[in-house]
Image: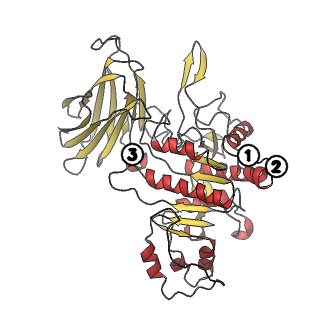
């Protein structure tokens, strides 16, 4: 087992070890160091972890703590060894060896933990290659920032990692399906600049609840499309936004300051971001209905998507009035080569409405067709799951975070059978995904597949 805690400072850990009696026999390097090739945090190997289990004060030997209980609950579902209550509580793959990474906090003015997560993935894959072992990675982590089309740095990074060594990456689809944090639409205009025809105006209404502190709104569209955007405040203050001039702009509407960023396409994407940062002049953003009027100037696709931050960071009343539950997968579950896991309620065999959904279905000449890759790939139990919390307590949890380790553990068992036992040395990556999809059972109440709610073919049934 290996544990890399990115939040720890090596010098402080060393200072805390002074005078400790190591009760594990044998000598080894007791210094606190980051993993080889990395400059932050502390890595604890199997010998150090065993020493902590035998120490009078294990928290001094391995001073890494799961204060929220989230990681402990996820790991227990995937791989708990069954030592509690005479083996009544076992994980899906209880004999697995573990590599655990506790992510560090994101740096100021950086994306949400993107760098920390990329380092963690690099570390785990390198370690698995060094050990000559297959690797099932569990990512019960996601955020709403991005165009959700697989082109972001993190999404492309995961696709590349999925091709290194013999690994499978399982990612939860997020809990934004019923949160009202996304709306998509399509508007059309005449072919030439300035010609506006038909249904030109599309108004997107956002309700901002009481006592809402600062928050952001993302608008994603194709760069080739040209829109005029008018923002209206709850009292009717109207501001037209110059979307042609890229860079930063600032507005003050009522008691709210709005910082705007008009983006450019990246080397890896044809999309453009228009980012609205709502900052209260006093304590809170103005309560009420904020409206975005989108008027096309020249369009090719005319598609757009609005996203709010994760619902856990917002007042419950802050949401779009008319939302689009499709395309609410959190990033990086949108990466193509990961196994994206949704959640269902095993007690009722019903889709969990909070579970992040995939891309919307389109109808062409009466036939339903998929728009891009259908996600999630499949669903697993994610409602009222009994697992282990900090201090060997038992907790009930819900969310796609806890559906994902069912699939991660299943992938680990498959790779053990195929690779470790030499029944199929190529049983990893997309091959594992294909077998899991084919072996999934249709969920009750969902009659058409592929399905943007529970996957391409169905779900994994709890045992």
Lower position in the chain sequence, tag 3 or tag 1: 3
Q: Is residue 282 visible?
A: yes
Q: Are marks 3 and 1 in contact (CB under 8 Å)?
A: no
Q: Is 389 or 116 nearer to us in this picture?
A: 116
Total numbered labels placed on residues in the image: 3
Q: Are marks 3 and 2 in contact (CB under 8 Å)?
A: no
Residue 86, position as x, y percentages in the image: 74, 70
Residue, disc 1: 427
Task: State the scheme by which the image is colored.
Answer: secondary structure
Quadrant in the picture for residue 307: top left
Count neighbours of disc 1 (C-alpha within 10 A) and say few if under 14, some if 14 to 19, many if 20 or more: many
Quadrant in the picture for residue 92: bottom right
Residue, disc 2: 423
Q: Nearer the viewer, mark 3 or mark 1?
A: 1
Q: Is residue 440 visible?
A: no
In the image: residue 109, left or right of residue 236? right
Q: Say which element carries label 1.
A: loop
Q: CA distance from mark 3 to mark 1?
A: 44 Å
Q: Say which element carries label 3.
A: loop
Q: CA distance from mark 2 to mark 1?
A: 9 Å
Q: Is 159 or 437 nearer to us in this picture?
A: 159
Q: Is 236 or 2 nearer to us in this picture?
A: 2
Count neighbours of disc 2 (C-alpha within 10 A) and say few if under 14, some if 14 to 19, many if 20 or more: few
Quadrant the N terminus occupies: bottom right
- Say if 94 sits above or below 253 in the image: below
Residue 23, position as x, y percentages in the image: 62, 86
Residue, disc 3: 316
Q: CA distance from mark 3 to mark 2?
A: 51 Å
Question: Residue sitting at 38 percent across and 40 percent down?
Answer: 308
Q: Say which element carries label 2.
A: loop
Lower position in the chain sequence, tag 3 or tag 2: 3
In the image: residue 35, left or right of residue 1? left
């Amino acid at each position: 087992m290996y544990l890399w805690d990115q939040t720890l400072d090596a010098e402080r850990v060393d200072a805390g070890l002074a005078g400790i009696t190591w009760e594990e026999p044998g000598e080894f390097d007791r210094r606190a160091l980051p993993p080889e090739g990395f400059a932050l945090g502390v890595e604890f190997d199997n010998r150090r972890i065993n020493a902590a289990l035998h120490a009078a004060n294990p928290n001094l030997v391995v001073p890494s703590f799961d204060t929220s209980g989230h990681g402990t609950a996820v790991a227990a579902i995937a791989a708990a060894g069954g030592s509690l209550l005479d083996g009544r509580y076992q994980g899906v793959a209880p004999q697995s060896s573990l590599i655990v990474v506790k992510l560090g906090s994101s740096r100021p003015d950086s994306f949400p933990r993107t760098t920390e997560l990329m380092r963690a993935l690099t570390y785990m894959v390198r370690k698995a290659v060094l050990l000559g072992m297959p690797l099932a990675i569990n990512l019960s982590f996601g955020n709403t920032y991005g165009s959700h089309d697989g082109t972001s740095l993190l999404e492309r990074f995961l696709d590349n990692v999925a091709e290194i060594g013999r690994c499978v990456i399982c990612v939860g689809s997020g809990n934004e399906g019923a949160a009202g944090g996304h709306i998509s639409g399509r508007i059309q205009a005449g072919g030439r600049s300035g010609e506006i025809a038909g249904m030109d105006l599309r108004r997107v209404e956002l309700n901002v609840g009481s006592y809402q502190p600062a928050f952001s709104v993302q608008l994603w569209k194709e760069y080739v499309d040209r829109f005029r955007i008018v923002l209206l405040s709850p009292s009717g203050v109207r501001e037209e936004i110059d979307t042609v001039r890229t860079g930063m702009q600032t507005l003050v509407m009522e008691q709210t300051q709005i910082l705007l960023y008009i983006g450019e396409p990246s080397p890896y994407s044809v999309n453009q971001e228009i980012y609205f940062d709502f900052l209260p002049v006093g304590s809170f953003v103005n309560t009420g209905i904020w409206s975005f009027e989108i008027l096309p100037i020249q369009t090719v696709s005319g598609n757009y998507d609005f996203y709010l931050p994760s619902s856990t960071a917002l007042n419950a009343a802050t949401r779009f009035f008319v939302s689009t539950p499709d395309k609410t997968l959190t990033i990086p579950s949108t990466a193509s080569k990961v196994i994206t896991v949704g959640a269902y309620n095993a007690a009722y065999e019903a889709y969990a409405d909070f579970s992040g959904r995939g891309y919307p279905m389109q109808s062409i000449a009466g036939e339903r067709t998929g728009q891009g890759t259908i996600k999630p790939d499949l669903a697993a139990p994610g409602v009222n799951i009994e697992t282990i919390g900090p201090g060997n307590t038992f907790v009930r949890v819900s969310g796609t975070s806890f559906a994902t380790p069912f699939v991660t553990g299943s992938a680990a068992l498959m790779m053990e059978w195929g690779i470790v036992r030499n029944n199929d040395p190529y049983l990893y990556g997309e091959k594992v995904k294909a077998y899991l999809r084919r072996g999934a059972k249709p969920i009750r109440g969902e009659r058409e597949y592929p399905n943007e709610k529970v996957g391409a073919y169905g779900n994994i049934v709890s045992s």
